[in-house]
Image: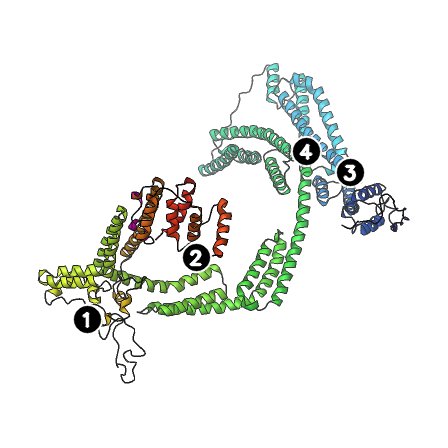
Amino acid sequence: MFPFSTQSKANPTPDAPAVSAKTSEVHPLDALTHGAFSAQTSGERMACIREWLATSPGNEQLQQVFKELSGKDKGAAKLLREKLDEIKRSKTQATIALEWADKAQALLALSKLNLADALAWQRDAAKAGAPLSKEPLAGLKAQLVERVRAIEDLQHRVQVQREAAVLLAQRIEVLSTKPWTDAQAAQEALAADVAHWQTEADVLVADANWSSVDVRFVTQLHDAQAQLQLVWQAFQDALALTIAASQDAAAPLPKVPVWADELRLARGLPLEPAVTQAKPKVDPEIRAKATAYVAEVLAKLEHEMAQGHGKASAGAANALRQALKDNGRLIDDKLEAQAHAALVAAGELEGWQRWRADQLREELVAKAEGLLKRPEGQAIGGRKMQDLLRGLREQWKLTDQGGVPNHMLWKRFDEACNEAHKVVEAWLEKMKAESAEHRAQRLALIEEVKAWAEANRVALDDDWKGFSRVLHQFADRWREAGHIGEKMFAELQPLWKAAIDHAAGPLESLQKQSLQARHAMIDEARALGAEAMLRIDAVKALQQRWQAEAHRVPIDRRQEQKLWDAFRKPIDEAFNRKTAEREKAQNALSERDRIVLEASKALQAANASGDAQAIRSAMSALEAALSGQRLAQAAVVAAGPAETDTAAAQGEAVAETPMATETPDVAQEGAAGEATEAASEPVKPVAAPKRVVAMRGDDRPGMKKEEPAAQGRGGKFGDRKDAGRPAGRDAARGSGRMDDRGPRRDARTDRPAYGERLDAPRLGDAAFRAQRDALEQAQFALRKLAAQAHGEALTHLLTAWETRDPAQVPTVQELGSRVSPAARSAWVKAVAQPASGEAATALLRLEMAAEVPTPAEQLSARRMYQLQLLTKRNDPAPAQTWVQDAATVLASAFDAAQVRRVQNVLKVLLKP
């Protein structure tokens, strides 16, 4: 290794002159911002910026520092941006505050202030974002509130004065029912009260806010004053006349009945009898109309009272009073008494409604004040808050309809609603900003669609599906572009429609052409389906054209499905007709199906028995049934005993020739038809088909030039010109070289020839499935039995090795075709002798021959032995000597540790 330094530690090098670090230039704004630009970390810069912001720098300095710092530190620049936003908001709020201050001053300068305008000023100012908690709006708000309070108080005092006037009039009326001396004693007190009431009324009228009072309150005060003056003047005149009559017996008596009777008693005069004036006779028709009218008004009042409508019932009561004034002399006493009782009940209901309305108002005030007093994490959102406030105000309006308004509760309710409405205002501002952003996104999307439409007037590489996919993506982006108002949506929707229609123009024109082509193909499908003979090739070609058109031009999924159904319908109907005809033909071949079904059931029973010989026999019987031999035999038996010898000869010919099958005539006719024909002519023996023999060169019939091919129409497929030749010729050819080879291993000698299979009738669905399942289960059962026999033979062989008993060695048939009798004799001899020798090498050779893995602990030994085999090229391979190696293993001592290895090897080597 090379040393990193040539200097020794014992002799340190002298200190090198220090290189002065390059000093960075100081930023011009660093001193202004208390070192923010020279700070090393973001936290230090933010601390410097906070310290500088505490000194209230100017707007221009803030703008300059923000511009320089925004590219260097986003966190520190965020503090500056927030300060700038705050200054901007302050300027905006100052402008709004001046505007609303002018409006407030204009309202205060009015001599007649409208309460609705004053209350709306605060609500509208809060909606506009005016700083109501800052001057000058705070002072103006307080002045408006104080003036509104003064006007409301003045209106309330007017109502109190009106009630006081009513009470004074009632006191005067009550005195008219008592002795005149009591009225004379109370006259002085009543005069003082009336004078005091008049003074209070004058004070109300002289108030500075009297011009702002609602007109109805002014009218109420004037009416109450006039009524009280009229009653008081009448009381004084009647009392003065009574006093004069008490002093002078010749003076006239007063018109007050109680006082007049009292004076008559004092003078000793008898009391005047009560004169009851009888109602004048009236026309019955007029009386009936008056009664019906009063009854109608009375029924309306009773209905309103049952519903509990305060104001409506008050109006109905006034209508009933007017009806009694107009028609009281025309109705009977019973209806009049019922009307007065209803009026009394209406008065009580009006008082209850007033009390109940105040209760409802207090509940609404509590709900409004509780909108903002909710637990943490359960605050109400803007949309829900807006709905709740709207619902509360509607309920307040309904409550006002049922009783006299309560301005004090309304003031609390309105203040709570205005405070809660700030949440709605913030939400509306947010929604307004989002709506503006969504509008910008939608406009940008429209421009993008227009640009894409100009650049893609034709689909790239004829990919109209991709063209349609892009249009759908544009539509999805439009739907997901966010919420906007209805007015804005109505403004943007036509622009979007025009842009997307322009972009989809090429596709729509192509879709029109595609629809015409598809309708033409539907007509072709109907024409093909209507033909008597269904042409499969034409149907496939038409379907391929349809699929190509569907893949090339996309259309609406529902419309495409409808067109596809219309295209499929005639073809499906044609195929259904063909299937019905095929099923009809299959039903005519029920005899052969029955024979195949019986053979399939017999094979299933053999499979369940587990006997391999029985399974093979049943399989042969099923193959014979499939080839038609059993049906031919059944036809011969049905021919009768007269043809027994001929049938026997035919059966022997069939048995000797497995490749022979029934003729097309036999396959198409049943056993009953054969029996009928046999009665008229003898049954002909089934001729064995001639085997196809290869011929030298072009010596086939018709290939030689001197032997021209036969003219005319050829026979059926499978027919031979020499079908009627005697069998001797074939027998003579049988001794040739080709026949001595025997059949191929993969040839199925039990199947009929191809031409005859083609002419054989088709099986029904049930028979075909039954024979297929039975054959599959039979093959599986034979494989399972073979595997079981193989396993049992291997187990017996290992048991014979363990017990050294040669009698337990399996036979040659049990061991399989891969073990010869000589090999079994060698194994028997090895087992019969005492254990000797070593089996490690023989086991390795067996594992090589079987190509099975060797245990991990023996891998090194196997590799060493494989290297040794490479040096012995002339020695036989392990695959050639596995029988001798197995004998060597069986001659060795039984080792339980090697049983698994021997079993794995012999399982492969003995497998047939």
| Residue matched to label 1 | 727
State how the image is colored: rainbow
Three-letter code for the amino acid on which mark 4 is drawn: Arg
Real-space CA distance between mark 4 and mark 3, rounded to the nearest whole angstrom: 18 Å
Nearer the camera: disc 2 or disc 3: 2
| Residue matched to label 4 | 412
In the image, taking residue 348 as reference, residue 738 lies left or right, namely left
Spot occupied by residue 628 in the image (x, y as percentages of width and height): 22, 61
In the image, taking residue 304 as reference, residue 654 lies left or right, namely left
Which of the marked residues, 1 or 3, is nearer the chain's N terminus? 3
Task: Specify few, some or many for label 2: CA neighbours under 10 Å numbering under 14, 14-19, or 20 or more.
Answer: few
Asked if residue 814 lies in the magenta stretch, the reply is yes
| Residue matched to label 2 | 875
Q: Which residues are magenta?
A: 807-819
* Nearest to the observer: residue 89 or residue 124: 89
Three-letter code for the amino acid on which mark 3 is drawn: Ala
Which of the marked residues, 2 or 3, is nearer the chain's N terminus? 3
Nearer the camera: disc 4 or disc 2: 2
Task: Specify few, some or many for label 4: CA neighbours under 10 Å numbering under 14, 14-19, or 20 or more.
Answer: some
